Image (cartoon, rainbow, N blue to C red):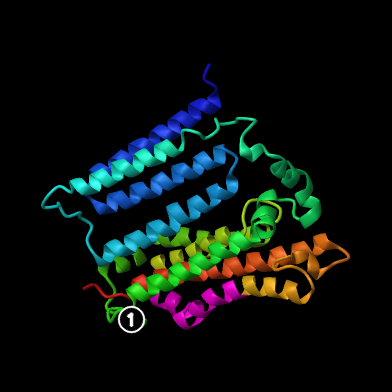
Amino acid sequence: MITMVTLIDLVLFTLLGITAIAMLRIRDLFAVVMLSGIYSLVSAVIFTDLDAVDVAFTEASVGAGISTILMLGTLALTSTKEKTPRRQSWGALLIVLVTGAALMYGTVDMPAFGDAASPINSPVTDRYITASGEETGVPNIVTSVLASYRGYDTMGETTVIFTAAIAVLILLGSARTTDAPVTPRPATTRSLELRPILRAGAKLLIGPILLFAFYVQFHGDFGPGGGFQAGVIFAAGVILYALIFDMDRARALFRPAVTRPLIALGVLIYAGTGIATLFFGGNFLGYSAFNPHHPAHGQELGIFLVELGVGITVSNVMMTLFFTFCGRRRP
């Protein structure tokens, strides 16, 4: 008998499949970008249904939000129509089929969904569930695992974001990039300014978006959120202001001379927290060393600092990439 939860999952996965097929068939790249945002949003709903709210948060903000904006910025510099290839690339099709077959083969020995003998149900997981709150002082298990037990891995992810931003800036750093005001502004931008409903709606949304970003940042200990999600949400609020109101004013407020050093500052805060634990006589990223008499209090302080570093890096990476795209001149 099919339960309601199973029926919802079937509907959502069917919608994902339809969206993916539509993206392959449509030649209008603007429609493809919109469909990719829908794909990410539906994926976020699926993650929420699976009780992976933190992952859903990230998918909605990054996949459906920032990624869509950056792809639209790319279309503004290129074209909205896909060029028809002169000849079929059978080699590319073969690579896709082989890769897909390898991925499917890799799932053969995976445990069934909900299997009690799955590695996820090992004693280590039970220990995280029962002891993480007391050991780290953080009631949200996801935050305690990512920022404390798995702190090395999360620092690596933050470094990857930093490195990716540097790589993108190097690729975009050509003579066509400029930080000066671009005049005259395109007619599409001027038309946005003449839409009172859009501007009034943005005025109502931007403040709560920025406030919610701080809530997600500093409430990540107790609920879904943290530096990754908060950084993207904050950047989305700034980007919304730039798109609806004044691109030049937003870029003047968040200048590259400010945002680019802050990208590195966030990574330095994370790594510096680990170095500080060494000076306090603990292991690298062993936050308990901050307060040996109350290790959980030291864990709370360490998690707060590293999450702050993640939020600073992520938000400034997103804003820097957006304004870098906007500063490029069309060839």
Q: Position of residue 203 (x, y in %)?
A: 49, 63
Residue type at numbered disc 1 = Thr
* Residue 4 located left or right of residue 222: left
Q: Is residue 122 left or right of residue 158?
A: right
Instruction: Read off the magenta span.
Output: 247-268
- Of 252 and 195, the residue lying toward us: 252
Where 20 sits versus 325, above or below? above
Residue 178 vs 53, above or below: the answer is below
Image height of 296 relative to 255, above or below: above
Q: Is residue 260 left or right of residue 330?
A: right
Where does the image place residue 70, in percent across and percent down from the top left? 37, 62
Quarter of the image for the C terminus: give it.
bottom left
Q: Which residue is mark 1?
A: 178
Residue 88 visible in image: yes
Would you identify the image quadrant in which residue 15 lies? Answer: top left
Magenta stretch: helix, strand or loop mostly: helix
